[in-house]
Amino acid sequence: MNRILTVALFVLLSSKYTFSQCSPQGNQTSYGTNNVWRGYMYNNTNFGNYRGYTTEGTASSPNFDQDFGGDNVNFTTYNCFVNTETFSARYKLTKTFTNGTYEFTVGGDDGYRFSIDGGNTWVINQWNDQAYNTSTYTVLLNGTYNLVLEYYENTGGNRVSFSVATSCTGSENTNTYGATDTWRGYLYDGTNFNIYKGMVTEGTSGNPSFTQDFGGNNTNFNTSGCAVNTETFSVRYRLTKNFPHGNHTFIVGGDDGYRLSLDGGATWVINQWNDQSYQTSTYSAVFSGTRNLVLEFYENSGDNRISFTTQFNIPLPVKLLSFTGKENNKLAELGWDITQDSDPDYFEVQKSNDGNNFTSISTIPGSAGQQLAASVSYHYTDPVHMTGTSFYRLKMTDMSGTVAYSKIVVISTTTVARNEIKIFPTIVTDNKINLKTGSSLKQAFIEIFDFSGKIILSQALPPAAAGQTINMPVSKGNLAKGVFLVRIKEAGVPVCTQKIIMQ
């Protein structure tokens, strides 16, 4: 028995002496080349007690999968060995990549992390105790890079793996716009248009509206090139569209971020670029001509959905809010307001000395095609000094050639024209509209109806003195989002009609 114990003790001491006395090879800084890694091994989990180096990969491929011979055994390095409990390894490789997209997959039990810039930053970082698992990083590379793969083993199983492959990407020109109301949608892996995967189309000829949910959460959505996973991805839709003159309304919705541009992405008329559950946003403007539409969307996690629709509101004839006049130093000063949805080509200021026979004295260009505020104002001063009483009216011509006339304003040194009723704002966001009267109201009534003629709301208004403003609540329970007409009656006679947009 004593002889056996003596031999065992000798073997143990001999192993310990050999472990402590061997001279590990390798300078711990040099990088491997030609797809062959240099792996520097350490006898603890934090790169202390250097024990020599090994190599991984072959001249044909840098990919490898290493389990170090099993749990709690001695793994041989150059000149020394390391026990496969509580050890660490740092692998280094300098590699040149031709221009392209590459997918790196790294796995480990326990911690692992991967860098493509010599260890300055970690594009994969799973530095914690864990059962074997893998992580993937996709990136566009072109040139020579210093790759670093670090690994540590605490207890139990041990394994580290590395692989790289060319990633699937799309080949289309992502700057090309769709046409004939059919969008071109360019899909990317990553929430910031990182890796282009391929193209899809949305909308149909004559109708650019669409809703897309990409097949559900955390699934693969096919494109013209490669499938994209529906978590952490992004899409850029492009469409060139020619719009007729009029008021155009855009409604965009998304979960998560979305934004819409009418000028190729230079500015965003709708911008909800943040994580959120599905919601919609609306933008309206009066314009015409060809526009380059860009609709961008990203999905972070959870549900995903993007929608787009547009409505064309046929422009109404010129709608006066007011036409007034006054005498100032023997000159007649005229002013008038029109609504945002009016479509004026030009105004002719007409004058009469008897109120029956009018002559045009000036032509004022309209503001058709411009994006206006709730109303726009015009002013004109008759340069001819007044002698007695003068009569004025407006001949209003819209873009379609339709002609309408204003009421007659009578101006002398002692009279001032009566104001009409003014309704504002025309775009309602707080459930309220305001009525400002130019004359007293005694038996006034308000009616709101849709464009089919159906009355949505009808009620009496309180009496009001000239110049008074009436605040009128409008319940969204009765009015959905859309376009409506407001009509004011006095003693049963219509005195004012105005279009409003409910948002």
Image: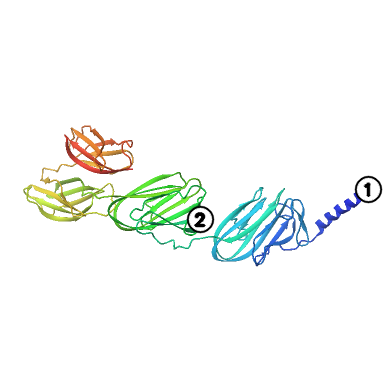
Q: Amino acid at mark 1?
A: Asn
Q: Which residue is disc 2 drawn over? A: 227
**Residue 166 percent coordinates (x, y):** 56, 62
Which dot, 2 or 1, sits closer to the camera?
A: 2
Q: Residues within 10 Å of mark 1 (few under 14, many from 20)?
A: few
Q: Which mark is residue 2?
A: 1
Query: Who's the residue at 73% across and 63% down the image?
Result: 26
Q: Earlier in the sequence, mark 2 or mark 1?
A: 1
Q: What is the C-alpha distance between the residues marked 2 and 1?
A: 71 Å
Quadrant holding the C terminus: top left
Identify the secondary structure beneath mark 1. helix
Q: Is residue 329 visible?
A: no
**Residue 241 percent coordinates (x, y):** 33, 57
**Is residue 161 depicted above or below 415 in this figure?**
below
Q: Is residue 231 left or right of residue 244?
A: right
Spot the residue most to the right.
2
Identify the secondary structure beneath mark 2. loop
Q: Amino acid at mark 2?
A: Ala
Q: Which mark is residue 221?
A: none
Count of numbered tags: 2
